[in-house]
Structures are given as structure tokens and as C-alpha cells.
Amino acid sequence: MKRVKARFGGRMVAAVAILLTAAAIVSFLVYQKGMVLARDFYIVGATDRAPQIYDQRFQVVTVDNSAGAVALRDGKIDVFITGTTIFTRKDDRSQHAAGALKTYLGKSEFARLAETYPLSQAFPLRVEINYLKGVSTDDAALATIPSAAMVDRVSADTALPAAEPEFIPPVTGSAAVIQPPLVSTANSKSDEAVRQQLIEVQNARFIPEFRAEFAPDMELIVPSLMTPPMPLAQVLLAFAYILPIFFISIFFTSSFIEEKMGRRINVLLSTPVTPLQVICGKMLPYIAYSLLAVTVITLFLRGNVLLALAIFLPVMLFIFSIYLGVALQYRTFKDQTFFSLVAVTLITGYLVFPAMFVGINDLSYISPLTLAVQMYRGVDITPVQYMLSAAPMLLVFVLALTAGSRVFNEEYLMSFRPIQKKIRDAIYFAMDRRHLAASAAIFALLFIPVVFMLEMGIIVFSISLPPALALGVVVFLCVVIEEAAKSIMVCVAAERGLVTRLKDVALLAVISAAFFFLGEKILLFLSLKVISESIFTSAVFASSALWIPLLVHAACTLTVCLLAFRLGEKRYPLALLAGSVIHGLYNISLVGVFS
Amino acid sequence: MNGFFSMVWREIKLLRKEKTIMFAILIQFFIASFSSIILTGIMVYYDPGSMGHNASTRLNVGVVGNDVRQFSICLGERRHHALHYTDMESAESDFKAGRLDAIVSISDIQSDTVNMKLVLPEMDAQATLVLMLLKEPLERYENYLRTRNGVTLRYQDVRSKPFTTYEFLYTIIIPLLIFFPAFIAGSMVIDSISEEIENKTLDTLLSTPVSINWVTGAKIIASVAVGVFQCMLWVILLIFNGFYVQNGFLILMLSAMVTAIIAMIALAISMFFRDRERSQFIYSLVILVLFSLTYLVSPSPFSLVARLASGDPSVGFLHVAVYVVVFAVTAAMTPIVTRKLSRA
């Protein structure tokens, strides 16, 4: 807090106050003028008989009939309007301008119809929206639309009428069995819906209430007055909630980097304060700002503040974990900016992509944005759904704090080394060098949430790929991640000379594999309560008889660790590949590719 | 003068090594290479209705009801398939099996008002797409019913093209692409100056025969060169993607002027605050205020780029010349301000 005060006190306060006042005045003036990006974009020639045009997108030039026709032909105006007739040229600019003018005038036409005719005649079509669960994503690739059977059935009964190329007549001709539509809304009720939509169309420039969905089940719409739905509310929620947290966490990282650059961190290290206290002390104010931001955003979007805080607190802690990692790893602002950019891209992807599958695939529950969408739709959130998205993030936070406080020493913080070497250094500093077996077990368990999040992310990203390719990609990437998580601590211990005998390396490898297996199975048990099993989850979290996968885990980790021990640090990728190939072949065999 | 150009070259070489800048340019290049596809995606947020115009998907719509002939014709005009079902249950069964994208059930059409039940898939994205594809057939059917009721909607027969994609491209996307490198250039100048100040290398540089204005001038020219290069890349890639950008030279000239003005403002800010964090913060606020302020002048830089790119005959060199004058004034003031701030 003091740092923020010092940084943003003094002449900064004056500068910020002046700029914010200027921003407020300018915003007011812009609001008064009306926010139109395409101001004067189209040039309209209009005679004095033409309707009035108040839209700022149009520069209106008053012309008479002959001058208008000439100006249109010469390209000096885009469209020419006289009375209720609009003249255009054939080129794109004129055609688009005509489209914009037609839509603008169309809105006043609706008002005219509503005033001139009874609503039942002016807006005669009332559509009730209903939702029905369709085909699932796993089956979607197999479904043919329309099915060959359906086409055969239709064409066998009757031929297509020549005048109606796309109209396929009834499958069976009996009119008597047709059931009436379920819509039986009284006209007065639907007229009220029309009036409401007319008001919405007339006030379209104001920001509508955020609903995270287009139309609730059973809502009535009128096609000509329909406001297009805002798709994928998840993305909007991501922008609304996540971006402010990113901004705040960048300040947190900057504060750390600055301490490192100014070597003030050395002074901190010499005080009786523990590393964990330093990290938490630096992080807490920024977490408080983030909580405030979430509260303000939720109040603005008229959501449930407590629920929003519960949903976004794990996200905040997760983002701060990643940024803590960036701050501990790097010493320059350039590196910080670069890796912050990469982190923003990856974290946003992890949060947004799974949430795209709301309502179609339970995998969406790995992202808290799914819960946020449910919150704005008034759908209940179960504790298991909450834990599935929150627990991995909270565990990553615990891992980051644990690792962060252990690597918080001058040697690590002030050194310039490539990222892979810094990661190895971090693992070396984080492990308890006197109790390596316990360290192997704890590392294996702590890595599980990270591995889980990465694997879930990979599965979600792969859904859009062709099934065969997706399976290959998922299996390959996931086994590499798992083998790396199980073997890295053992390999670092061996490389730094903490274990020198082959049998000790083997023992640590088996312990790491066993604890990873144990944690993975517990997590699988919990996640399958929410996520329905698919070919991908089977391939990654294969669950046959318990002793076989345990043996496979142990064998693969042994392969990686022993090869790396024999071949040396530089050959670690090769050893990792060897272990991954064995693990991958086993996983693929489980989903029946070889049978 | 050779010394000055070697400093400019040094700055450009330093920028080339800058991972962040290269990453940002790479992302921009990637986006621009697929801009026609990405534009369609972004358009969905700007105007969800554009999905109906841009998507070429043909839907299979199950139609239930006694008098569905006219609605089926409306579907056929947009090349969607109307599959007639005698009852809702069999339609729902095919819908659940993935053979139908939507179901429409129409009530008695003899009265003034027709009630229709539209069944959509539960998945958000799919439901939105299907609804937007059905919007036009539904509107056509609504107009048919209006005409039958003796009501005429004017301006419906005007020959035109959908305008939202066109407006979005020229008034939002192209101005953003043209000015984004300018914002980045300002940020780069702040990073570069702050680093020189914080690492005390600026003092070392100033102990050589070069003046402070040579040092800062080289940084500004390097950032403007990178900015204009990015704009050129954007324009070329947009043309490759089938988006015609008119008045390319004037747009690049405007971009260079705006980039230089922003870079000089960023320079003054970083020389005043002398540390990166505060300079970047103030710079963001200044840019926000300045660009909001330009909205009040006509044409604003955003609007001018949009109108130049779309071939508006009422804008041209004279409008760009205004920014050349602003640039000249800023360029004349910058050395004085820089000298003063460097002594502070």
C-alpha cells in the first residue's frame, strides 16, 4: 500500500486528477454529441420531399431531382432519396449506403405501422422460442444432417414440387394427426410483448440489461422487431471480469520486478520477515483491489455479489500465482511484458474456451466463467461443479506460494538464466534436500492440479479437431505433461548430485509415480461426478484395474528418470519422449484403437 | 548526420531483438493473414444479425402444421430445407437425433395473428446461429402475413446490400489497425527512455558528443518507422484478404503523422516522470483523453481513416494536411521540452 502511495503520490496525484477530470469532461461532451464511429460516413442526396434523416452516419445534401440524379451518377453522393423512393448506383459503396438508409428508415416505418394499424395486423407473426437438448458434441461428428434414412423416407413418399425447390412435403399425409402448436398465448399478452419490443427497437442506442442469454425459454419474439442475440456471453464476462484482474496483477508483478531491479529485495531478505509474509504482504493489496473490481462489475451487471466473489476469487488467486511466477523468474520489464502477454493469452484461452461449451459438454465446468454464466442465468450451481473449477486454481495458488517462499533467496531472484534452467533452479530450491522421498511424494501431489488444468485445456482445444487427430494430439501432449510432472523433481535431484546411485533414483521415481497415481485417481473420482466420460477423458484418465495403471506409471517414470540419469541433463527431452511413448501406447490401447 | 542515422539504426536493431514487439507483430501478422475469417467472427459481436448474411449454412427445418406452404417457400428462398412432419413428437425425435437444426410449428393462419413455436438447440452458439439464419425467412413470412392483412411496409423493395460488415470493417477495424501501431510506438518510446534512465545508460550516452535531441530523435524515428511498416503490412494483408483500402498513401501519411505525434508526447511524459510504471500509466490516460477529444472534431482521425479507406469523395489531402501541421508544431516544440526536462 505504501509503495502504491509513494508511486502515485505527489505530482502524480495532480497529473492523474487533471487527466481524470479531463476524461470526465470529454466523456460528457462525447455523450452529448452521441457516440457514432461512422459519423458522416455516407453521403445522401435528398429532395425537400424526402423524410427527415437524423442519423449521424449520413451527411445529408439537399438537392433537386435533376441535380440529385447527376450527383449520384458522378459518385458525389452515395444514394439519392426523393419522397419514399431511394435511388442507388450498382457499386458497393452505394449499395451498402442504401442498406444502411433502408434499415434506418425501416425503424420509423415500424412506428408508423404501430400508430396506423391494430398490432394484430401490423405485427401478425408471434414466435415463441423453445429450447430442446439436441445431439451432443461426441455424437455430433457421427450425425449426418439430414440422415440418409430421412432423405430416402421423404423422397420415397412424394416428389418435390417444381415451384418450391426446398420444400419437402409431408412424410405422411394424414392431416388429422397433426397436433396444434403448444402456443396458446392470448393476443393481449402477445400484443404486450410486441409493445415492449417496439420500445426496445426505438431505444436501441441505450445499453440493454446484461442477461447472458438471448431469450429465456417460452419468450415471445416478433421477427421484424427482434434484437439479434448477443452470442457467447462467456467472452463478454471474460472481458468484464478477467481483464481488470490482469491489469491489477501486472501492477503486482511490476512492483516485484522493481524491487529486484533496485536491489531493495536484498534489504527485505535481511529482515526477520519470512518470504511467505513478504509475498503475501505484496499480494494482499492487489487482491483487495481485484475483489473491489469484481464487486463493482457485479453491481453494474446486476449480479449476485457474494456468488461472484466466490466464483472469481479462485480465478484471482490463480492469475496472481502465474504472475508471481513471472515476477520470481524475471528481472527486467521487457521480460515481464513478454511473459505477461503470453500468460494473458494462455489464461484467457483456458477460461474462455471451455466455457464455450456451456450446456453441451460438462467439460465446460473446468472454467469458472461457466459458473458465472449460470449465475447470470439464474441457474443453481452445485458444490461439486464449483469445486471442479475452483479447486485446481486454489491448489495452483498453494503450489505457487509454497514454491515461491522456498525459492525466495538472493541467488535465485537475482540470477539471469534461461527459463528451463530457472525452473530447475526453482525445483531444486523448493525441495527438502534432507527428505527427498517426502519431497518426491509432495511434488507429485502438488503438480496434479497443474497437470489437470493443462490436460483439460488440451482436451477442450482438441474438440474442434477431426476425431482421429484430436485423439492423437490429446494423448501425446497429455502423456508428455504427466511424465514431465512425475520425473522432473527426481531428475533435478540427480543432476544436482543429491542422489548418486541408480537404485535411489529408481526408488524416488517409483514414489513419485505412486503418489501421482494416487492423486490422479482421487481427482478423477471427483471430476467424473461432473464430467461425463468421453473417448478423450478415457484416453487421458484411463481407469481399468488399478494395479495395471500403477505399474504403467511406475514403468514410464522409471524409464524417464533412469535414462536421464544415465544420459545426462542434456538428454532429458529424449528420456521424456521415451517414457511418453510407452505411456501413450498404453493409453491408446485402452480406448480400443488397436483392437 | 551519419552519427544520427547510426543511432536510428541502433534503435531499430534493438527493437528487432525485443521479444515483446516481435510477438505483437507476429500476432498482428497472423490475425491479418486470416482477417477475412476473423472479421466474420468479430462481426458476430458487433452485429449478431450479420451471421444470417455471412453464413452459407443451409438448415434442415422441421415444419409442423396444417398450412406451412408459404413459410416453406420463405425457407426455400434462403436455400434452407423444409421437412414437413405430421406431429411434433416425430420432429422432436429427429431433432434429438441431430437430423434437424430447428423445428417450427405453425398455428391456424386464418386469423390476423399467427402464433408460431420455434424449437432451437440448447447450445448457445448453435441456437444463435440457427435463429439468425432463420431471421430473414421469418421476416419474409411476417411481411407476407402483413400484406395479407392489407398492411404495406415501405422501403422493402430497395436494392441494397447488408451494411453492418462494411461499416464495421471501415469504421472500426481499419482505424484500429492503423492506429494500434501508433499506441504501441508511444509505449515503446517510454520503455526505451525509462530503461536508459533507470539503467543510467542515458548519462553515459550524453557524456559522448551526441546531444539529448539526437538520442530522443533516433528513438522516435525508429518507433515511427516500425509503426508505419506495420500499417503497410496491414493494408497489404487486408487487400490480399479481399478488402479494398482506397487512398493508401494518404492513410500511411496520416498514420506516420499520428504515430510521430504520439511518440513525442510519450517522450515528454517519460522524461518528466523518469520511471516506466508511472510514465506508462499517465501515457495510457493521456492517450485516452486525447483520442476521446479528437472525437469532437470533424473529421476525427478515426473517422478520417474510415472515410479515406472507403473512398469517400468528400475527404482528401487537405484533411490529412491538418495533421501534418499539428505534427510540425509538436516537432518544433519537442527539442525545447526535451532539453528542459533532461536538465530537470
Image (spheres, coloured by chain):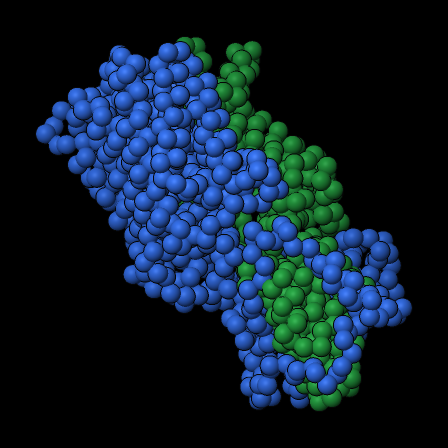
Residue at x 76% of width, y 53% of height? A93
Q: Quadrant of the N terminus of chain A?
A: top left
Where does residue A399 sit, x and y in percent of width and height?
A: 28, 36
Where does residue A176 sit, x and y in percent of width and height?
A: 73, 85
Q: Which chain is green?
A: B
Q: Is residue A279 visible?
A: yes
Q: To which quarter of the image does residue B74 belong?
A: bottom right
- In this view, the residue in front, A487 or B224, is A487
Residue at x 75% of width, y 49% of height? B313
* In this view, A559 is above or below A61: above
Where does residue A174 sit, x and y in percent of width and height?
A: 76, 81
Q: Is residue A125 visible?
A: no
- In this view, the residue in front, A365 or A439, is A439
Q: To which quarter of the image does residue B237 belong?
A: top right
Residue at x 55% of width, y 86% of height? A189
Q: Which chain is blue?
A: A
- Side of A486 relative to B166 (left or right): left
